[in-house]
Image (tube, coloured by chain):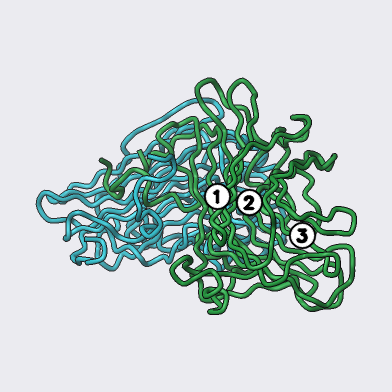
Chain colours: A green, B cyan
């Protein structure tokens, strides 16, 4: 085995690429949010590539003991909260994201390979969630917006309450080139004071077949829901090379002015990417 | 085993030392440069120890989609551009480097061991490079004690056009003190709009024999050149304990005042170090 490496991937996988297949990128981005200070716009969260973005009163906090307790001290390690803030507006938001163009639209791999974009987060809702009085949304997955602007390209979980769309469950949303947002209802109820492990996988095989799977585990009630989300047309899946995306999670107000904050708590974010990349890194060989 | 994961500890070994030999340091630095912002002089690049140094108009640009396309979206993952900037001067520069004194001069190990300093980067030249008419400057890649001026100590790839030195090819420069230096011509042309995988390895065995190998793969033209670079005198190797160096990649204007920015695009940076170091870290044992 090459020196400097005691198992082939271990040292270099934080947000880096390493694969035993030189035509394929395998990379993991993970943060357990143990950082003393919150992820900032200039200093990455533990994990090295996850940043915060917030505006209009939105804010983040890191490792507040009340949030740790809410998850359960034996159920979480390191927490961060995303708050829409108490400024009187309809635009306060907070997000955590990677660069929003490190991933091309879902590429079709060559024969025998597969492209998989996976996003996972352990989150907990606060004692109140977005509703008709305090409107807003939670979104997480892959997209190209790191603000409260809608995703032009993306595949992501969504819980939206804006007076027109009044979700009570998690949805999987598909959008390409700012076109129609195509949503699939997972039927998993979103409620206050619940811990959810949210997992989303979008994959393409070499014959151009796309499969989006989700796994939502409500750890508070010990229920697990797994399924496949399919848009009404595959044209809603961001597949072009120029459909750049990154991993993200956003909590935002929308539509109606309010000075009431809505929070969401995160224990960890994990992102795993497998996609065609033909390069050979000598130092890891 | 799941892809992207090979052992439970993978997250903690980035750029830490790990060795099965308690008298030797084995260490890897790697950045795929996928972070959202920066790099900056205060916020490390993904990988945790790579910083930007720039001045006099020089700067950097992260994950610009046109640079991603330049490499090819299935040939790279995360990019960073360093630029000499458009300020009218002869001094604009930008570099990504670790601290420039983390490595001593290449130490001769005890019997049975070897010292190796390896540096690798996947880079791409822009549509213009340094030339002898309007833009003097240099690209340097490898181990060096300074990222501006002429490094007193180092072993690095060098492409310099300054009116006196008029490189058309990649050279390997050796320096141990201001006066004891020489260069070795690899014969590999440096041209515009080319992607190069640059690999440099400097090693010394317990008999005090130095070997410097290079591998330059021009992925655009699919040519690969490998060879051994030798200084005109072994005294040009930075081998004294105080010949401190660090891994760096730098581009700078030189000699002639001009306002023309010259870019160097980087997909990843990797360094692997094996050198004598006597310590035992219990947590890794």
Q: CA distance from mark 2 to mark 3?
A: 17 Å
Relative placement, left or right, of B92 versus A132 is left
Q: Is residue B222 above or below residue B72?
A: above
**Which residue is more in the foreground, A71 or B162?**
A71
The residue located at (64%, 36%) in the rendering is: A228
**Which residue is more in the foreground, A134 or B237?**
A134
Relative placement, left or right, of B260 versus B213 is right
Question: Disc 3 is attached to a residue of which chain?
Answer: A
| Number of numbered markers | 3
Looking at the image, is mark 2 or mark 3 earlier in the sequence?
Answer: 3
Which residue in the protein does label 3 denote? Answer: A137
Pinpoint residue A130: horizontal percent, then vertical percent.
77, 65
Which residue in the protein does label 1 denote? Answer: A271
Q: CA distance from mark 1 to mark 2?
A: 7 Å
Which residue in the protein does label 2 denote? Answer: A247
* Secondary element type, mark 1: strand
Question: Disc 2 is attached to a residue of which chain?
Answer: A
Q: CA distance from mark 3 to mark 1?
A: 21 Å
Q: Is residue B142 visible?
A: yes
Relative placement, left or right, of B54 versus B22 is right
Q: Could you confirm whether marks 1 and 2 are on the same chain? A: yes
Looking at the image, is mark 3 or mark 1 earlier in the sequence?
Answer: 3
Looking at the image, is mark 1 or mark 2 earlier in the sequence?
Answer: 2
Which image quarter is the N terminus of chain A in? top left
Which image quarter is the C terminus of chain A in? top left
Proximity of marks 1 and 2: CB atoms separated by less than 8 Å = yes
Q: Could you confirm whether marks 3 and 1 are on the same chain? A: yes
Pinpoint residue B93: horizontal percent, then vertical percent.
59, 60
Front position among marks 3 and 1? 3
Residue B58 appears in which quarter of the rendering? bottom right
């Amino acid at each position: 085995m090459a020196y400097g490496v005691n198992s082939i991937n271990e040292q270099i996988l934080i947000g880096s690429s390493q694969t035993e297949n030189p035509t394929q990128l395998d990379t993991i981005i993970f943060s357990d949010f143990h950082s003393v200070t919150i992820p900032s716009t200039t200093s990455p969260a533990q994990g090295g590539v996850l940043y915060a973005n917030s505006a209009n009163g939105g804010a983040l906090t890191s490792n507040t003991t009340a949030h740790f307790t809410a998850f359960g001290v034996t159920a979480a390690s390191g927490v961060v909260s995303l708050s829409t803030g108490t400024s009187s507006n309809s635009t306060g938001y907070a997000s955590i994201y990677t660069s929003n163009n490190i991933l091309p639209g879902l590429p079709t791999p060559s024969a025998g390979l597969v492209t998989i974009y996976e996003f996972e987060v352990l989150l907990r809702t606060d004692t109140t969630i977005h509703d008709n009085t305090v409107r807003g949304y939670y979104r997480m997955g892959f997209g190209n917006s790191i603000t409260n602007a809608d995703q032009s390209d993306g595949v992501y979980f969504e819980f939206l309450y804006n007076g027109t769309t009044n979700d009570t469950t998690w949805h999987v949303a598909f959008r390409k080139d700012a076109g129609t947002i195509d949503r699939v209802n997972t039927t998993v109820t979103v409620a206050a004071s619940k811990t959810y492990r949210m997992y989303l996988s979008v994959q393409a095989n070499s014959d151009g077949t796309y499969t989006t799977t989700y796994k939502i585990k409500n750890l508070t009630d010990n229920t697990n829901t797994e399924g496949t989300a399919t848009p009404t047309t595959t044209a809603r899946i961001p597949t072009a090379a120029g459909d750049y995306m990154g991993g993200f999670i956003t909590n935002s107000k929308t539509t109606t002015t309010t000075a009431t904050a809505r929070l969401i708590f995160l224990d960890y974010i994990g992102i795993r990417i497998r996609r065609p990349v033909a390069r050979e890194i000598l130092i890891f060989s | 085993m799941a892809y992207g994961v090979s052992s439970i500890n993978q997250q903690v070994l980035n750029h830490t030392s790990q060795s099965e030999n308690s008298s030797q340091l084995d260490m890897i630095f790697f950045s795929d440069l996928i972070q959202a912002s920066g790099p900056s002089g205060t916020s490390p690049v993904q990988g945790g120890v790579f910083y930007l140094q720039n001045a006099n108009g020089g700067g950097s640009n992260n994950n610009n989609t046109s640079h991603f396309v330049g490499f090819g979206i299935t040939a790279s993952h995360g990019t960073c551009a360093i630029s000499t900037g458009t300020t009218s001067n002869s001094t604009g520069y930008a570099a990504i480097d670790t601290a420039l004194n983390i490595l001593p001069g290449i130490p001769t190990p005890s019997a049975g061991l070897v010292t190796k300093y390896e540096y690798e980067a996947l880079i791409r030249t822009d549509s213009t490079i340094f030339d002898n008419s309007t833009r003097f400057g240099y690209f340097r890649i490898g181990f060096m004690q300074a990222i501006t001026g002429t490094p007193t100590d180092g072993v690095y790839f060098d492409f310099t056009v300054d009116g006196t030195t008029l490189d058309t090819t990649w050279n390997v420069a050796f320096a141990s003190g201001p006066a004891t230096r020489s260069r070795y011509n690899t014969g590999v042309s440096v041209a515009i709009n080319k992607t190069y995988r640059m690999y440099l390895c400097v090693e010394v065995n317990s008999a005090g024999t130095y070997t410097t190998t290079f591998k330059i793969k021009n992925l655009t033209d699919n040519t690969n050149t490998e060879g051994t670079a030798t200084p005109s005198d072994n005294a040009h190797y930075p081998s004294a304990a105080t010949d401190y160096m660090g891994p760096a990649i730098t581009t700078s204007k030189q000699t002639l005042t001009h306002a023309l920015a010259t870019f160097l695009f980087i997909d990843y940076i990797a360094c692997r170090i094996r050198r004598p170091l006597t310590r035992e870290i219990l947590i890794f044992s």
